[in-house]
Amino acid sequence: MSDASEREPMSDASEREETVPEGAEGAPADVAELQQRIIELEDRWRRALADLDNLRKRVSRDAERVRAEERARAAAEWLPVLDNLERALEHAESDPPSIIEGLRAIRDQAQDVLARLGFPRRDDAGTAFDPARHEAVATLAQEGVPEGTVLHVVRPAYGDGDRQLRPALVVVAREG
Amino acid sequence: MSDASEREPMSDASEREETVPEGAEGAPADVAELQQRIIELEDRWRRALADLDNLRKRVSRDAERVRAEERARAAAEWLPVLDNLERALEHAESDPPSIIEGLRAIRDQAQDVLARLGFPRRDDAGTAFDPARHEAVATLAQEGVPEGTVLHVVRPAYGDGDRQLRPALVVVAREG
């Protein structure tokens, strides 16, 4: 048992698959032979259960590790944004006009981080209203614009499809 | 096999554990009985292998899902920061003095997000230099300050111990 628990479940399972013994059906067998086969099968079966148990334990350990790793990876992406926020504040008092430029750069940088994580900022102005992607906060009649067109994005969406972090809040054209 | 593949490996393994048949050793056995036992054991063993195979497949599917979920969860935390950056820029032109206040609030908010993700900003000024947590960018003699004291943090660390995203860049006191 302790031996089985050291081994890698994957390779084991396939190795053993190749050595499947013949079933009980077949040529006349003597008792000693059958008993030997039973011992072997019990051993194989117990080892498979041990492998299953080990894999199960590994799965729960791994899920937590994967989660923590991914969280750290995603968080680390934001450190330059934090640094620039601090830097912009340090310079804000001495050179007020520079702060707007700095703030703009930080906003672009933050949007880049989200895009790299798989959630680019979406620009929905001018597209057709889609309840899966948009949430209407108001409607507005506007000449020459077809009903259901997104006129204005109040709060942008990030990501798309399955990977949408939130829908966009939009103002939609209605019939005039 | 198709039946085994539907079942949950965990509960199966323990259920079957309770029904371990006696070994080949023991009271005199007839051939038919032994053959029956072999059929049962083969079935159990094959089911354990099938469970192992299913669990293995599930593991690789799950890791990707866990990763994507965690990435989305971490990314979503930053949306209010992004919103506030955009909002600060919108108001910057009309009310320049307000921008510094806004920027300060955004910095605090961004630090809060990192703390919630498990990586609080660390203030290392005044602590003893520790190569696992600090990276010295300069040394400076300062009267009355013991050698090896962190005098100034050039770039802060976030997180601690295993969960440190990066070490702090620091200026360290040396002997005068």
Image (tube, coloured by chain):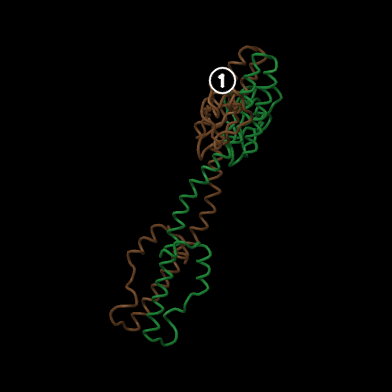
Chain colours: A green, B brown
Secondary structure beneath dot 1 equals loop
Q: Is residue B138 left or right of residue B21?
A: right
Q: Which residue occupies the extreme front position in the image?
A: B176
Name the quadrant of the C terminus of chain B. top right
Tally of numbered discs: 1
Is residue A7 or residue B99 the one in the foreground? A7
Subunit ID for the residue under disc 1: B
**Residue beneath the point at 52% across and 69% down:** A15
**Residue beneath the point at 35% across and 80% down:** B34
Name the quadrant containing residue A82.
top right
Say above or below: B34 vs B50.
Answer: below
Q: Which residue occupies the extreme right position in the image?
A: A144
Q: Position of residue A170 (x, y in %)?
A: 61, 27
Say above or below: B98 vs B172.
Answer: above
Q: Position of residue B132 (x, y in %)?
A: 55, 38
Q: Position of residue B17 (x, y in %)?
A: 35, 64
Which residue is denoted by mark 1 in the rendering? B143
Amino acid marked by disc 1: Glu
**Pointer 1: residues within 10 angstroms few (<14), some, or many (20+)?**
few
Name the quadrant containing residue B153.
top right
Q: Position of residue B84 (x, y in %)?
A: 59, 23
Is residue B53 or residue A78 the one in the foreground? A78
Q: Is residue B44 visible?
A: yes
Q: Is residue A169 visible?
A: no
